[in-house]
Image (cartoon, rainbow, N blue to C red):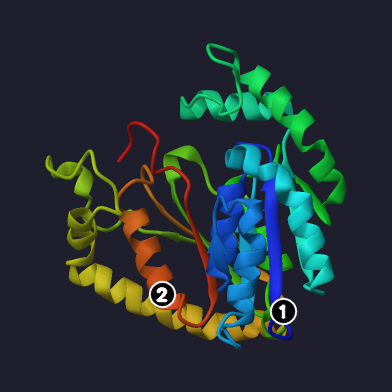
């Protein structure tokens, strides 16, 4: 592999957050492949080796979805060791209760549960099959008490490139005031003064990520003036926060129910900031019923 290439191998239990993990690394510029059979790791490393310097950071997700191919993982790791290729293994897990709850919420069948078997049966079988891999992990993360945005933050902070270690991470949270303020917000902006798509019949059931709702929110002169003032304030504040060594800034944007105005403006702020900053967005209340 080209000198300085960083390889991260993500594995672990189904429902423990591997999708969030690989998306986080993708946001950091990693070249990512999901569900790669371990037998192909050697071939993939050869492709990277031939890429000169165009690929510097790679992330692979390898888990039991690979079926019988997964059991060749240790052979693949031995091949990487022999080739002097540096890699890190990140193992994601969660407690049984959390995994059961996540699967029930998703209404998906656990991939390793026996036919007509319980979700818990699949979890227990998977734990046994992954135990040997877990012992090889460089980093084990238990996500039982983590929200997706918190897991994403772990990856953003741990796997930033050397030159990005001092970069301020910006977390934008859209929310509904009726459900309470985000407890970790550093700055909160109230956009309930803007015209509300909730009162437009064709838009009520949609949210601020829908193009028609987004355009409705953005078309008002008050929205444009507010966003320009917000951009100016953020541009002023960020260098000062960075100078003080603040690693993370959480910006909350709230409307009544957290479905329309706050979501649209959070997306607009993300668009403005993401060119020069590491930015994540969490639409906290977008899926909640009711509200305006």
Q: Quadrant of residue 102?
A: top right
Query: Element under label 1?
Result: loop
Q: Quadrant of the image for the C terminus?
A: top left
Residue 5: x and y, percent? 69, 79
Q: Residue at x 70, y 68 (%)?
A: 7
In the picture shown, does residue 19 fall above or below 26? above
Q: Residue at x 64, y 38 (%)?
A: 68
Query: Element under label 2?
Result: helix
Residue 274: x and y, percent? 46, 75
Q: Which residue is mark 2?
A: 230
Question: CA gap, disc 1 to disc 2?
Answer: 26 Å
First in sequence: mark 1 vs mark 2: 1
Q: Residue at x 26, y 58 (%)?
A: 194
Left or right: 127, with 153 as reference point: right
Q: Which residue is mark 1?
A: 165
Give residue 186's mark: none
Q: Quadrant of the image for the N terminus?
A: bottom right
In the picture shown, does residue 112 fall above or below 229? above
Residue at the right extreme? 135
- Identify which residue, 115 or 251, lies in the foreground: 115
Residue 207: x and y, percent? 29, 47
Q: Residue at x 53, y 23 (%)?
A: 104
Between label 1 and label 2, give the one nearer the viewer.
1
Residue 65: x and y, percent? 58, 39
Can the viewer see residue 146?
A: no
Q: Quadrant of residue 76?
A: bottom right
């Amino acid at each position: 592999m080209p000198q300085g290439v960083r390889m991260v191998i993500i594995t672990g239990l189904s429902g423990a957050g591997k999708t969030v993990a690989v998306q986080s690394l993708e946001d950091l510029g990693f070249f990512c492949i999901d569900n790669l059979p371990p037998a192909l790791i050697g071939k993939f490393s050869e492709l990277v080796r031939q890429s000169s310097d165009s690929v510097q950071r790679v992330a692979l997700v390898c888990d039991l979805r690979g079926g019988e191919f997964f059991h060749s993982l240790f052979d693949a790791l031995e091949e990487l060791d022999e080739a002097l290729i540096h890699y890190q293994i990140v193992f994601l897990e969660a407690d049984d209760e959390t995994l059961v709850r996540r699967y029930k919420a998703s209404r998906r069948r656990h991939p390793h549960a026996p036919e007509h078997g319980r979700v818990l049966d699949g979890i227990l079988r998977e734990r046994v099959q992954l135990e040997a891999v877990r012992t090889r992990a460089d980093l084990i993360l238990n996500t039982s008490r983590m929200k997706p945005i918190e897991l994403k933050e772990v990856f953003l902070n741990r796997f930033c490139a050397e030159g990005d270690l001092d970069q301020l991470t910006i977390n934008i949270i859209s929310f509904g005031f009726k459900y309470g303020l985000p407890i970790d917000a550093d700055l909160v902006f109230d956009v309930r003064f803007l015209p509300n798509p909730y009162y437009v019949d064709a838009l009520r059931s949609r949210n601020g990520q829908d193009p028609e709702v987004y355009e409705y929110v953005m078309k008002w002169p008050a929205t444009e003036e507010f966003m320009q003032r917000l951009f100016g304030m953020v541009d002023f504040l960020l260098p000062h926060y960075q100078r003080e060594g603040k690693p993370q800034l959480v910006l909350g944007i709230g409307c009544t129910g957290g479905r329309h105005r706050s979501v649209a403006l959070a997306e607009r702020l993300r668009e403005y900031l993401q060119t020069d900053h590491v930015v994540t967005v969490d639409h906290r209340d977008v899926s909640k019923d009711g509200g305006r």
